[in-house]
Amino acid sequence: MELRHLRYFLAVAETRNFTRAAARCFVAQSALSQQIARLEKDVGSELFSRTSRSVRLTAAGDLLVPLARRILTDVDHAQEELDALGGLRRGRLRLGLVQTLAGPLDMVEVMAEYHARHPGIDYHIVNATSTDMAAAVASGGLDLAVVGLRPQQLPEGLDHRVLGSDPLVVIVPADHGLADREAVDLAELPATHQLIQFARGSGLRRQVEEAFARAGVEPGRNFEVAQVHSMIRLAARGVGVTVVPRSSVQGPNALLGSGTGLPHGARMLALADSAAVHRISVVYDSKRLSSAAAAFLEVVDHHLRPDQSV
């Protein structure tokens, strides 16, 4: 029996769905199914009752859930104590990171300083939707995650610290009817416009949909893209319009060019909706925070309050 088998088992037990469990654990569904089958062989009992429509725990599965949680908690605590004893000379940090990093905090600088302070810590960086990464922190698959979710959208039991926020802006092609405006209301977009949207499950997607709901209009025809910089470039090429955090095109976290402007052919318009902001938080479980993760939070705090000595 391997520890990863227990993590996969708990993910399926908590989601009651192999597809969602695989996404939470950042593995292919086929690989997760194979490992669950291997675990069932090791324990000598079926752990799940599967049908085409549902996944339910068997009696053996119900029995294993609290035991698996206890085993994984004990292992995490043991690793934490060993890391602390070693003075962070070695260890691992599993960090989830969104593409859209709002506000003045430069996560590249944070990671560089952390590495300078603790060069023996191995990084494992994951880029996925905010929903999946927050779930991975809750299940123990990640130590920390920087996500674009509001506190009420986080899994129960997770702690968070707000890292920054900035306004959402509309990116339109230069020949768009609203391109000469400085600010617009989403209700002013033509009914036939095509909206270039970010992936489902992302914090940005939720924030944009909330902004359209406040404006009392439907988002329009949808064009879904998995990369924010591609959304901006597609808007510049006239494929449609998109709504992104201002820091995606300006400042240290800009995804295009030098961070001082837009790609050729694009215009950036402010939103009249003051509630349309992109908030970024780091989420973690304080009850099982490893020494490596706690040290990372210290560096984050230092960059948020540079006058603070750490």
Image: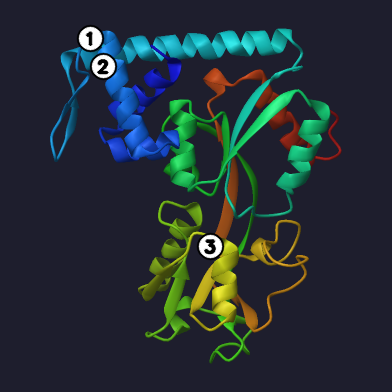
The crowd level at tag 1 (other Cα within 10 Å; few <14, some 14-19, many 20+) is few
> Tag 2: residue type?
Glu
Q: Which residue is mark 3?
A: 275
**Residue at 53% of width from left, 84% of height from top?**
238
The numbered mark at residue 93 is: none
Q: Which residue is mark 1?
A: 44
**Residue at 51% of width from left, 10% of height from top?**
75
In depth, the one of 144 and 127 nearer the eye is 127
Q: Position of residue 296 (x, y in %)?
A: 70, 30
| Position of 190 relative to 63 (above/below) | below
Distance of label 2 from label 3 (alpha carbons): 49 Å
> Tag 1: residue type?
Gly
Q: Position of residue 259 (x, y in %)?
A: 75, 65
Is residue 218 among what the camera can see? yes
Q: Choose the circle earlier in sequence order: 1 or 3.
A: 1
Q: Is 65 on the left or on the right of 174, as rendered? A: left
| Position of 127 relative to 178 (above/below) | above
Distance of label 1 from label 2 (alpha carbons): 6 Å
- Quadrant the C terminus occupies: top right
